[in-house]
Image (cartoon, rainbow, N blue to C red):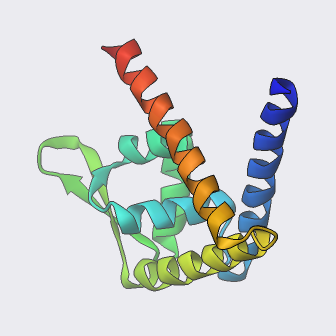
Amino acid sequence: MMNNLAYLLVDKSRLVRRRFDDSVRDHELTGPQARLVLLVDRQPLARQSFYAEELEVEPITLCRMVDRLEERGWLARQPDPADRRAWLLSPTAKCHDTADELRNSLEGLLDDLLEPLDAEERTQLASLLSKIGNSDMQSAQVAHG
């Protein structure tokens, strides 16, 4: 049972990511770039290291992503007043507008994927996934004490 459950979680996660990656191509973004656009729009003015950690990519990978997005007018870098070696990322108007479109697209994608579930089952799924996420966060806090 547990092996099957693990497979199902990983497989469905991959399906959501693949569909999301396909949907962002209309905006001339890759999946990782779109996730960065959404993250910077939601949590602006953080250091690049924060975004790299959140997206689970190496700092150099994030730096290259930011280079491309900055050249195309999606993001802006500004010096961190607390550390002259660090950069803060801020969203541009293009980023704001596109982030709204991406959120709407993601909502539609999830509606399609969850179509077989009724409202109560969707609520239950969200609750169970949140429970797993909260449990994982508590375990991480205990481990890092």
- The quarter holding residue 124 reads bottom right
Q: Nearer the viewer, residue 58 or 18?
A: 18
Q: Is residue 25 left or right of residue 81?
A: right
Residue 38 seen in the figure: yes
Residue 90: give x, y in percent of width and height: 32, 66
Q: Position of residue 128 (x, y in %)?
A: 58, 46
Query: How many numbered marks, from 0 up?
Result: 0
What's the residue at 58%, 46% (across, down)?
Answer: 129
Determine whether 59 is above or below 27 in the image: above
Picture residue at 45% right of the left edge, 68% below the top: 70
Quadrant showing the N terminus: top right
Q: Is residue 105 above or below residue 35?
A: below
- On screen, residue 3 versus residue 81, left or right, reads right
| Residue in the image at 78% along x and 66% along y | 19
Task: Name the quadrant of the C terminus.
Answer: top left
Q: Position of residue 83 (x, y in %)?
A: 17, 40
Q: Nearer the viewer, residue 117 or 143?
A: 117
Q: Position of residue 108 (x, y in %)?
A: 67, 80
Q: Residue at x 55, y 37 (%)?
A: 132
Residue sticking out furthest to the left: 82
* In the depicted structure, whether residue 2 falls above or below residue 90: above
Instruction: For residue 22, say whether it is visible.
Output: no
* Front residue of this view, candidates 124 and 90: 124
Left-right relation of 136 to 80: right
